Image: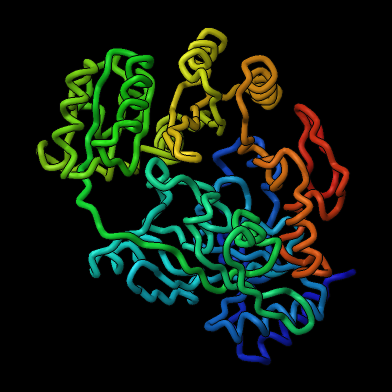
């Protein structure tokens, strides 16, 4: 297939669809936060679309998909571009489809229906106006779209209470359009939503989401100092497991992270302390404060208790931790990984092996009802070979599961293997393979197996060069 870009642009323009061909906007909208990764920063530097298209309605979106299908033009769907792995970057050019005008929000009792371009913070605001709140949101909530979060994200604030997006209870329904001569509507519910959730838009274009919302809680922000990382771990697990404490976020930072990178909050902390940042309900705050005292902690910050203005506490957690570190030291990067049962032992092993080269940052989530630790450690970057070696040591020697954020494909970033169900669904929804091509290895190579230290990009397994 050879894309017929000029013919496609002419056909879309003739239909009255907003098309942008200027170099500046195309450059900006072909980017996400891939620069968090020095490897992706190099590999994806020249990636850009041929044009942008902005539908005003699902009907226009259908026309865009049908027209691009007719002219064999790849389509990459983009929300706000807050992702970190190049999920919304058009590896093979073509059309970047902007969802910003598909931003309808409809709040009901116990549920919200929204267009993919709805800003998550606006959904939360409208939900709270009715005495309700959303379950999960990323640290980029102020700008991230709900469609982008579901297609590219996996967890966030709220996961300690509700688990991540893989929890079947957290997504009620997805409405998608297929990419074919006459795009079809498919409604996904139950376990089927994961054919399109966290699929980077390769399995259809999300046009509507339905999510559960719950009675609103009055949340308080609290920053707790503890003597060291092990004490912070013990406190964080105790806080997450305590049935008398209701949490929305529990984040842990080893000593030194706050002093170096939390420029606004660091004046409230003591040097050498580990920190745990918590959103706790106002109703259970007394039980929380009793636990702090019992476990040797000290409340260093509580919203409303200090003079001055501070960022929202979630803006030092999740991948905002990496963002704040990058603003201070552009050589910093990060990893994503899951601890096993012996979190304390694995943290000790990491520090013994890497010292300050790997700085511990943990977010706490709930998986099958159990509190689990996932890490987004900060890494002092030297070169690509060393970063790949760190990943290998963490997985093969220290027993952690690494979800590599320095990979652009679905399989390498998280699944570690091809997903037959997602592949079969893509064959149904995208018969020409035009939706976000290059992001699903299984489409090109169903028999692919990962190789340590090597990445699959642009249809081939690549080494360090």
Image-quadrant location for residue 312: top left
Q: State left or right for residue 309 relative to residue 162.
A: left
Please state which of residues 277 and 367 is positioned toward the viewer in this rendering: 367
Residue 445 pos. (x, y %): 87, 49
Quadrant position of the N terminus in the picture:
bottom right
Q: Left or right: 165 with respect to 159? A: right
- Vertical relation: 286 (above or below) 312: above
Identified at 65% across, 75% down, the residue is 186
Q: Position of residue 195 (x, y in %)?
A: 67, 59
Q: Nearer the viewer, residue 413 or 131?
A: 131
Displayed quadrant of residue 92: bottom right
- Residue 291: image x %, image y %? 21, 25
| Residue depicted at 37% across the width and 44% down the height | 161
Quarter where residue 391 is shown: top right
Q: Nearer the viewer, residue 320 or 110?
A: 110
Q: Quadrant of the C terminus?
A: top right
Q: Position of residue 399 (x, y in %)?
A: 63, 20
What residue is at 44 percent from the left and 27 percent from the top?
361
Tell me which residue sits at (60%, 22%) in the image.
382
227 to 309, vertically: above or below: above
């Amino acid at each position: 297939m050879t894309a017929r870009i000029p013919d496609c642009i002419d056909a879309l323009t003739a239909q009255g669809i907003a098309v942008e061909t200027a170099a500046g906007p195309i450059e900006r909208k072909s980017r996400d936060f891939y620069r968090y990764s020095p490897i992706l920063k190099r590999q994806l530097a020249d990636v850009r679309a041929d044009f942008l298209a902005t539908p005003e309605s699902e009907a226009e979106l259908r026309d865009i998909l049908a027209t691009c299908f007719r002219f064999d033009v790849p389509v990459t769907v983009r929300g706000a571009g807050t992702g970190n792995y190049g999920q919304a970057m058009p590896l093979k050019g073509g059309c970047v489809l902007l969802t910003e005008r598909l931003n309808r929000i409809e709040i009901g009792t116990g549920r919200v229906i929204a267009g993919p371009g709805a800003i998550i913070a606006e959904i939360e605001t409208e939900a709270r106006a009715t005495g309700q709140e959303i379950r999960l949101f990323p640290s980029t909530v102020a700008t991230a779209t709900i469609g982008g979060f579901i297609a590219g994200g996996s967890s966030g604030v709220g996961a300690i209470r509700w688990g991540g997006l893989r929890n079947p209870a957290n997504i009620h329904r997805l409405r998608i359009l297929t990419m074919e001569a006459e795009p079809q509507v498919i409604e996904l519910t139950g376990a089927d939503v994961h054919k399109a959730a966290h699929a980077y838009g390769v399995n259809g274009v999300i046009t509507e989401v339905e999510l559960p919302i719950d009675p609103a809680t009055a949340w308080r922000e609290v920053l707790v100092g503890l003597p060291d990382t092990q004490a912070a771990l013990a406190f964080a697990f105790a806080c997450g497991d305590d049935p008398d404490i209701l949490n929305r976020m529990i984040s842990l930072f080893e000593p030194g992270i706050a002093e170096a990178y939390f420029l606004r909050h660091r004046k409230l902390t003591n040097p050498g302390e580990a920190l745990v940042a918590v959103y706790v309900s106002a109703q259970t705050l007394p039980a929380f404060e009793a636990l702090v005292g019992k476990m040797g902690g000290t409340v260093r910050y509580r919203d409303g208790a200090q003079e001055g203005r501070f960022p929202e506490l979630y803006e030092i957690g999740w991948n905002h931790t990496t963002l704040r570190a990058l603003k201070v030291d552009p050589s910093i990067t990060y990893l994503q990984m899951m601890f096993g049962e012996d979190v304390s032992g694995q943290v000790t092993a990491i520090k013994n092996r890497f010292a300050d080269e790997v700085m511990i940052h943990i977010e706490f989530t709930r998986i099958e009802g159990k509190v689990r630790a996932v890490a987004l450690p900060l890494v002092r970057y030297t070169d690509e070979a060393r970063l790949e070696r760190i990943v290998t040591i963490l997985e093969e020697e220290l027993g952690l599961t690494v979800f590599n954020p320095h990979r652009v494909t679905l399989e390498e970033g998280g699944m570690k293997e091809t997903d037959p169900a997602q592949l079969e669904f893509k064959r149904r929804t995208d018969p020409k393979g035009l939706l976000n091509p290059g992001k699903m290895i299984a489409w090109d190579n169903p028999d692919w197996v990962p190789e340590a230290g090597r990445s699959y990009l642009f249809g081939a397994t690549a080494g360090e060069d």
